[in-house]
Amino acid sequence: MSTAATQQDAAARLDAVRARIAAAAREAGRDPAAVTLIAISKQQSDERIAAVLAAGHRVFGENRVQEAEAHWSARRATVPDLALHMVGPLQTNKVREAVALFDAIHSVDRPRLAEALAKEMARSGRRPACFIEVNTGEEPQKAGVLPADADAFIERCRTEFALPLAGLMCIPPHDAVPAPHFALLATIAKRHGLASLSMGMSADYEAAVTLGATHVRVGTAIFGERAPR
Ligand SMILES: *Cc1c(COP(=O)(O)O)cnc(C)c1O
């Protein structure tokens, strides 16, 4: 595709997703402006990323620190209003880079990571907003704190680690109806007075908005299919 065609395509997809978010929000009696659209740029080409930037979008998400640095470190300097969200699993040995690059981290899911984040925030003075990931489907291979352990972990993140907690995040099981997972996440967040809910991807972001998502993480519906790693 020519650069112009790629740009038109990106702008059209972005408009379509924004319109569907707004419609779902209004239908649920919510303010569309209360929903942040995070464009997930993992495994996308430089040309497509440039096209979504050219269309005016500024909020992006990645799931690997190194790839995020490749996509965004240089652009940070030229796009000052960029907001970067880490949505993938985070290893403690990548915490320094993650705190330096990201404005929000959606995958806080264990005490060792929470502690490492707290230490690095104190050292660097940077305080990215933290979301605690909840494994709502209780899938053994998936990251996230189990729902039964969520209350205690949220309290520890608040009191012991003093993390700047924004809210909760979940990724429902691939083959499940997502709504009950979104509802469970909203219930846990409400119990703790947490305002932000990171939930909903390309296939289910409207359902997530209906159930209170404040952050939807949309990749392929904006960029097109991802390249294999
Ligand atoms: C890749 C990814 C997304 C985006 O997925 P799409 O189905 O392409 O919208 C959202 N959240 C997380 C955590 C991801 O890793």
Image: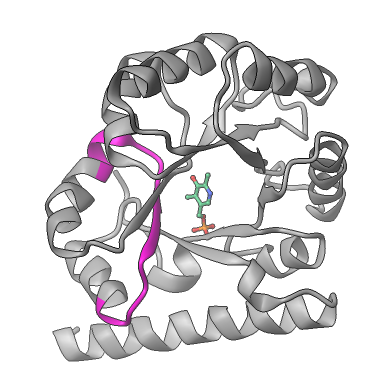
Give left or right: position of 176 versus 196: right
Give 185 or 121, whichever is nearer the viewer. Answer: 121
Whether residue 47 is situated above or below residue 173 in the rendered picture: below
- Where is residue 210? Give x, y as percent: 80, 67
* Residue range corresponding to the magenta coloring: 54-68
Q: Is residue 161 above or below residue 51?
A: above
Say if 15 sits above or below 51 in the image: below
Picture residue at 57% right of the left edge, 15% below the top: 161
Residue 110 visible in the current orientation: yes
Quarter assignment of residue 130: top right
User: Which quadrant is home to the N terminus?
Assistant: bottom left
Asked whether, in this view, residue 207 is left or right of residue 219, the answer is: right
Measured as percent of width and height from the top left, residue 208 is found at 73, 60
Name the image quarter holding residue 227: bottom left
Compared across the picture, whether 224 is left or right of 168 comes to left
Name the foreground residue: 29 vs 3: 29
How many marks are shown on the rendered structure? 0
Tell me if 212 is positioned left or right of 63 in this view: right
In the figure, residue 121 lies in which quadrant?
top left
- Residue in the image at 42% along x and 34% along y: 127
One can see residue 2 in this view: no
Q: Is residue 202 magenta?
A: no
Q: Position of residue 196 (x, y in %)?
A: 67, 49
Q: In the picture, which quadrant includes the C terminus?
A: top left
Look at the image and say whether residue 55 sits in the magenta stretch: yes
Relative height, residue 109 to residue 5 (above, below): above
Q: Residue at 30% of width from left, 35% of height from top?
A: 65
Q: In this rendered view, identify the residue nearer to me: 12 or 53.
A: 53
Foreground of the two, 217 or 142: 217
Q: How is the image coloured?
A: one colour
Name the spot of residue 226 as percent of width and height, x first: 36, 58
Q: Residue at x 31, y 17 (%)?
A: 123
